[in-house]
Image (cartoon, helix red, strand yellow):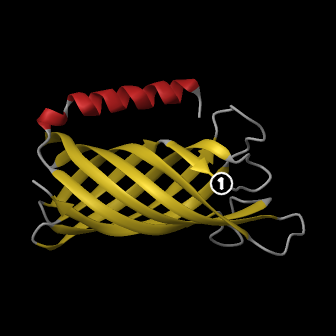
Amino acid sequence: MSSKSITITFLLLFVLMANLGAQTNRKIGLYTGAGTERLSDKLDLGFDYRYRVNFFQFEYSHTIHSFGRTNLEGHFTPQFNTTRYKNLDGSDYYKTSYETGLNIAIALRQEIIPRNFSLYIMLGTGPHYIFGAPDRQVSGLIFSDNLFIGAQVRVWDRLHLDIRPGFRHISNAETRHPNLGINSFTLSFGFFLEID
C-alpha cells in the first residue's frame, strides 16, 4: 500500500467521522468466512505459496448519505483471523498462525426491494498484524486491502443476513522486505442488526 493510499484512507476516515451526525441507519454485525488463493487449477493466485485464512469479524456500519434508494455507507471492521500457510518449495505441511486488524471501508448500496433486499460494492483497507506468512511476505505490520460485492436480505424484523464474496490483498507498503504480498479470494457471511 502506498503513502497515497494511506492518505486517502485517513481522509475517508475523517469524512466518515465528520458525518456521524448525518447518519440515517446504523447496524452492527458478526461475520465469519474464509479466504484462499486457489479456487481451481485455472484460478490460482498463489503460484509459490498457500495461505488459508478464516475470518472472525465484528462490524459497525452507518449510512453517510442517501440518494433515494442508493446509500453511501461507512464500515469499521475489527477482526481476529486464524491462518494456515506453506511455501510450495517441497514443504508437505501447513504452519498455523493468526492475524488481527481493523478494516475501514466505504460501501455503495442499492436497495432492490427497499428495507428487504439490497446489493452493494465495498472497498476497504486497514492495518493488520500477521504472526506468520509464507516466505514471500515478511510477518508483522501489514495492510489488508479488500474489494467485496455483497447481498443483504432481511430475515426478521431488524435482522439481516449478509453474504459477500470478494478479493483481498495483504502487504506492508514497502516498509520491510520481502513484500510480494498475499492474495486471496474470500467468502464471508454474517448477520447485521439495525440499531436505530
For the point 44% across and 64% down, which residue is it? 56
Number of numbered discs: 1
The answer to which quarter of the image holds residue 193 is: bottom left
For the point 42% across and 68% down, which residue is it? 32
Q: Left or right of 95: which side holds 30?
A: left
User: Label 1: few (<14), some or many (≥20) within 10 Å?
Assistant: some
Q: Left or right of 153: which side holds 169?
A: right
- Residue occupying the far right of the picture: 90
Q: Which is more toward the observer, 27 or 100?
A: 100
Indicate the position of residue 47 as horizontal and vertical percent values: 77, 59
Indicate the position of residue 49 as horizontal and vertical percent values: 76, 61
Amino acid bearing label 1: Phe
For the point 58% across and 47% down, which residue is it? 129
Q: Which is more toward the observer, 67 or 185?
A: 185
Please, is residue 158 above or below residue 147 in the view? below
Q: Which is more toward the observer, 67 or 18?
A: 18
Q: Left or right of 178: which side holds 151?
A: left
Residue 43 in view of the camera: no
Indicate the position of residue 177 as horizontal and vertical percent values: 77, 37
Please, is residue 54 above or below residue 13 in the view? below
Please, is residue 164 above or below residue 146 in the view? below
The answer to which quarter of the image holds residue 23 is: top left
Location of mark 1 (residue): 131
Residue 192 in view of the camera: yes
Q: Quadrant of the N terminus?
A: top right
Indicate the position of residue 60 as horizontal and vertical percent values: 28, 51
For the point 28% across and 61% down, which residue is it? 29
Q: Left or right of 91: which side holds 169?
A: left
SS assignment at label 1? loop
